[in-house]
Image (cartoon, rainbow, N blue to C red):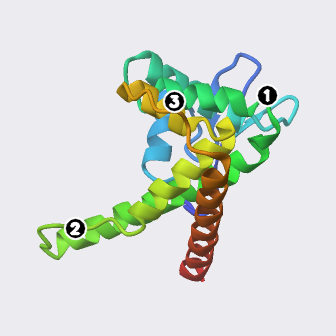
Amino acid sequence: MADDKKPLLIKRYASRRLYNTETSDYVTLEDIAGFIRDGREVQIIDLKSGDDLTRQYLLQIIAEHESRGENVLPVNVLSDLVRTYTNQTGSMVPQFLQMSFDMLRDGQSKMVENMAKANPIPTMPGFEALQAQQEAFLKAMTGGLAGAWTGAERGDTKAPAAATEEDEDLDVIKKQLSELQDKLTKMSK
């Protein structure tokens, strides 16, 4: 059996065909998506240049799923991601997304554990903190206008809160984020 801790090496040939080095056969993007869904890390390398193409192919898999109507990412999230490539706050996005997905995975596994124990109302640990973290992220990304945009989408016509309130909210959220980082660090030990 292959070592699941080591990424599955996929080589891309000049013909753009993808070759699974463990099973010695060609694979498709859907096969690679299946490996990832099964929890396997994948690394895709160009055979000729040695370039790591993993990111490119993972984005392609996501784009294909989205184009087939399997929408996971709302348009406003995709727009926010595009914005991060054009401003200086983009440097915090990868860490935020990683922590959010880590929390989601942890919450899902705890929820499954609770369901297995026949708990009728499983709770997802850290859900409130995740919401606060997402709100802080939107405020940081949009310069505090996230509340105005989400309110306008609901039909609210209220003006955004004063800058001092936003600063206080941001400080509270930063503290919560720091506490979450400490908890994640302790959980990973």
> Quadrant of residue 48 in the image?
top right
**Front one among 79 and 114:** 79
Which residue is label 2 attached to? 122
Q: Is residue 149 above or below residue 120?
A: above
Disc 2/disc 3 C-alpha distance (Å): 32 Å
Which residue is label 3 attached to? 149
Tell me how many marks there are. Answer: 3
Residue 86: numbered disc:
1
Q: Is residue 142 above or below residue 71?
A: below
Disc 2/disc 1 C-alpha distance (Å): 40 Å
Which residue type does callout 1 highlight?
Answer: Thr
Tag 1: Cα neighbours inside 10 Å, few (<14), some, or many (≥20)?
Answer: few
Q: Position of residue 119 (x, y in %)?
A: 14, 73
At mark 3, the secondary structure is helix
Mark 2 vs 3, N-terminal side: 2
Which mark is in front, 2 or 1?
Answer: 1
> Quadrant of residue 124 in the image?
bottom left
Q: Position of residue 141 (x, y in %)?
A: 67, 40
